[in-house]
Image (spheres, rainbow, N blue to C red):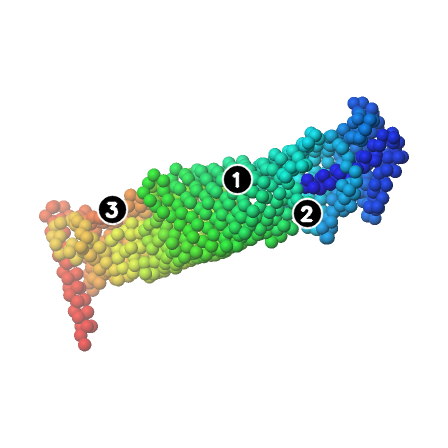
């Protein structure tokens, strides 16, 4: 950029020699003649208004208005200057011609580089440098604009203000302007430097400041400080040691770094080594990182980083996380980039608590994208020491960003993530969910060969995951568990409070473990099916159970009822109406069905129906799910051809150890004396036991006969 600026200024300096010759200082015709002689061989003409301002104090000055350097062939102006002031030093009257002050106001310069690499004003630059050098003490540009175009880019420098001061053996430069253009972010730049023409490093104390707004980082600014020299053959500025820093308001990002022997030119850049140390704050996480890159280059609008690596540590009051990202970055063109050999390694553990390692990743692959925000990610490797494969496609437009892809894990263990002593999600996770997905959506095929939760192990978990700012959908869900399979859906709504609904169709599972893990019911065993349709609110188990509503329908075949032996109750309970829970007792059955309605964590009028070889049980009851308590009233009916006797039984207490008692009040209803009631109870129990015993003997004989050869 400096080459272009000073090359163009050299043209003005040489023009100033001819226009400011003392003998013709006040002669507009002679000034025009001299200027056109200078550009005659270049196919250009110089024009300016005939109204020339002249003054003698504080120095002899001539002011030209609307100066134009026009290309005769294209009939377009290469240079326009609103006002050009040439002030001569008083010593010019007595010796060497000296311009004390050259000021250009509202200049507009069009620079075009052709396919051969030559700039349109190169011939004037060469002519300006080949002639007699003009001694100038001060050069000022105010509100200048450079329009710069090459084969692939259209850029500009606008609102440019420049001051150049001759300090004798050195010169001081101050420059400020706005750099922008096609496919690049606008930069507000400031440059200060001291020029020593005879030193090895001609440019001393170069200080460059940039203010800009980056889409990801927000308002940002950077500073670079270095010494440098100009390499005319390569048309490059080569630095000595470089000290630099970058600060962004968002997430309080601050980076400091250094480098050596950087080479900077128009549309090309080479950084042999780039190192930096970064700090940031994201939510509750304090982040420290080191950044390194080798042989970074930018040539013909292509960035290339043969090797970069970012080592970072994330620290919160709950967790400490190590994350390392490395790869090989290249820009395929101004809009498209790719990272090959992309590697991600991470590890998280708890702070001030027992070790609980998680997010252990060792992934490699590639990621590519463009400046519109579109991208593709492909990673393979291990997550929590298990194989994983990730493929995602990110497409972005002005209205919405869509992520599509697939994720496959050999095994996912959720137990380290469900540790009750720490929370995986930050307190404002719902707001973060909404903010991140306000204009984004995710659709992915998720498959997990083995899923370990705090309570169950699930195999062959498959679902289509859909996520936006308001809802999370897993629909459909299919998986294998407890020796059977299930399919259904889950929908979570990002509301206040959080709400959810689930639907599940379970087939052929071992019901003891399933009911214990799902409902906390411990006493029913066998193979069976279940249909659930639930909804509720909240983010923890207590909130879920308090709001749980819907319907469950459970069927169990060829099972046992643990904790009670119906036959033993009838045989031994001569006058006893309460039977204690016994872990070794069992009641076999052919079939049982439970119909369980739920409303805000409670069940009313749940229906129970059990069929055994010799008797049936039917009844209704209530359940308090949060307290894990039940209260059922059922009737035991023994089957006989001509008559049937019903025995009322009450089941209440906790899920784990319910109590069983014969409903004495119902059984003796209508009887008056205690002896009558006791006799009725004894007779009913004896009769029930006799029928049950006869039925059991007949059933045993039948089975024995079947086994005979």
Density class for disc 2 (Cα within 10 Å; few <14, some 14-19, many ≥20) is few
**Above or below 570: residue 9:** above
Q: Are marks 3 and 1 in contact (CB under 8 Å)?
A: no
User: What residue is pinned by disc 2?
Assistant: 233
Q: Tell me where residue 326 appears, x and y as whole percent.
A: 49, 50
What residue do we see at 65% from left, 51% from top?
300
Residue at the bottom extreme, as displayed: 709
- Find the distance from the CA under tag 3 to the CA under tag 2: 90 Å
Q: Are marks 2 and 1 in contact (CB under 8 Å)?
A: no
- SS class, disc 1: strand
Q: Are marks 3 and 2 in contact (CB under 8 Å)?
A: no
Q: Tell me where residue 614 appears, x and y as whole percent.
A: 20, 62
Residue at the top extreme, as displayed: 57
Q: Tell me where residue 627 appears, x and y as whole percent.
A: 29, 43
- SS class, disc 2: loop
User: What residue is pinned by disc 3?
Assistant: 654
- Residue 257, numbered label: 1
What residue do we see at 66% from left, 42% from top?
230
């Amino acid at each position: 950029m400096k080459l272009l600026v000073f090359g163009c200024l050299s043209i003005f300096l040489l023009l100033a020699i001819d226009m400011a010759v003392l003998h013709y200082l006040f002669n507009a015709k002679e000034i025009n003649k001299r200027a056109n002689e200078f550009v005659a061989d270049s196919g250009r003409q110089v024009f300016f208004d005939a109204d020339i301002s002249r003054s003698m104090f504080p120095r002899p000055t001539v002011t030209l208005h609307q100066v134009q350097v026009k290309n005769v062939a294209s009939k377009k102006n290469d240079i326009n200057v609103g006002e050009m002031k040439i002030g001569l030093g008083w010593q010019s009257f007595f010796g060497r011609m000296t311009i004390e002050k050259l000021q250009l106001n509202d200049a507009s310069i069009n620079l075009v580089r052709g396919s051969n690499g030559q700039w349109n004003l190169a011939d004037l630059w060469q002519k300006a440098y080949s002639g007699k050098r003009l001694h100038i003490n001060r050069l000022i540009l105010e509100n200048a604009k450079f329009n710069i175009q090459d084969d692939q880019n259209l850029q500009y420098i606008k609102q440019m203000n420049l001051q150049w001061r001759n300090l004798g053996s050195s010169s001081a430069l101050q420059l400020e302007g706005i750099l922008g253009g096609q496919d690049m972010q606008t930069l507000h730049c400031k440059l200060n430097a001291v020029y020593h023409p005879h030193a090895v490093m001609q440019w001393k104390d170069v200080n460059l400041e940039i203010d800009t707004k980056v889409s990801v980082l927000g308002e940002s600014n950077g500073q670079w400080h270095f010494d440098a020299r100009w390499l005319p053959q390569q048309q490059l500025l080569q630095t000595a040691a470089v000290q630099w820093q970058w600060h962004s308001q968002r997430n309080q990002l601050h980076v400091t770094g250094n480098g050596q022997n950087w080479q900077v030119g128009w549309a090309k850049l080479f950084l042999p080594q780039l190192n930096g140390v970064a700090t940031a704050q994201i939510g509750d996480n304090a982040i420290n990182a080191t950044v390194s890159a080798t042989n970074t280059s930018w040539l013909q609008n292509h960035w290339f980083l043969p090797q970069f690596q970012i080592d970072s540590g994330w620290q919160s009051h709950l967790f400490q996380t190590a994350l390392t990202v490395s790869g090989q970055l290249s820009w395929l063109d101004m809009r498209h980039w790719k990272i090959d050999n992309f590697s991600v390694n991470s590890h998280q553990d708890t702070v001030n608590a027992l070790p609980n390692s998680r997010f252990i990743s060792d992934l490699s692959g590639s990621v590519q994208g463009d400046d519109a925000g579109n991208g593709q990610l492909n990673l393979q490797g291990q997550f929590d020491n298990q194989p994983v494969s990730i493929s995602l496609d990110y497409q972005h437009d002005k209205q919405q960003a869509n992520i599509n892809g697939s994720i496959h894990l050999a095994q996912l263990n959720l137990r380290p993530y469900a540790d009750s002593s720490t929370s995986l999600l930050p307190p404002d996770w719902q707001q973060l969910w909404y903010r991140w997905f306000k204009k984004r959506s995710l659709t992915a095929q998720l498959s997990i060969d083995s899923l370990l939760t705090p309570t169950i192990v699930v195999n062959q978990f498959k679902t289509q995951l859909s996520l936006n700012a308001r809802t999370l959908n897993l629909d459909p869900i299919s998986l294998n568990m407890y020796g059977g399979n299930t399919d259904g859906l889950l929908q979570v709504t990002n509301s206040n409070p959080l709400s959810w609904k689930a639907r599940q169709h379970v087939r052929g599972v071992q019901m003891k473990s399933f009911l214990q893990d799902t409902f906390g019911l411990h006493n029913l065993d066998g193979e069976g099916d279940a249909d659930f349709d639930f909804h509720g609110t909240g983010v923890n188990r207590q909130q879920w159970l308090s709001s749980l509503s819907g319907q469950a329908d459970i069927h169990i075949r060829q099972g046992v009822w643990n904790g009670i032996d119906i036959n033993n109750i009838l045989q031994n309970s001569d006058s006893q109406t309460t039977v204690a829970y016994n872990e070794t007792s069992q009641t076999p059955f052919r079939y049982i069905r439970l119909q369980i309605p739920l409303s805000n964590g409670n069940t009313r009028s749940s229906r129970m129906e059990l069929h055994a070889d010799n008797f049936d049980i039917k009844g209704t009851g209530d359940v308090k799910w949060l307290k894990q308590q039940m209260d059922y009233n059922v009737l035991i009916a023994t089957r006989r051809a001509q008559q049937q006797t019903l025995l009322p039984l009450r089941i209440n207490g906790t899920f784990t150890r319910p109590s069983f008692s014969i409903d004495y009040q119902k059984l003796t209803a209508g009887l008056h004396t205690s002896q009558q009631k006791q006799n009725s109870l004894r007779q009913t129990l004896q009769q029930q036991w006799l029928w049950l015993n006869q039925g059991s003997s007949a059933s045993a004989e039948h089975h024995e006969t079947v086994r005979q050869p």
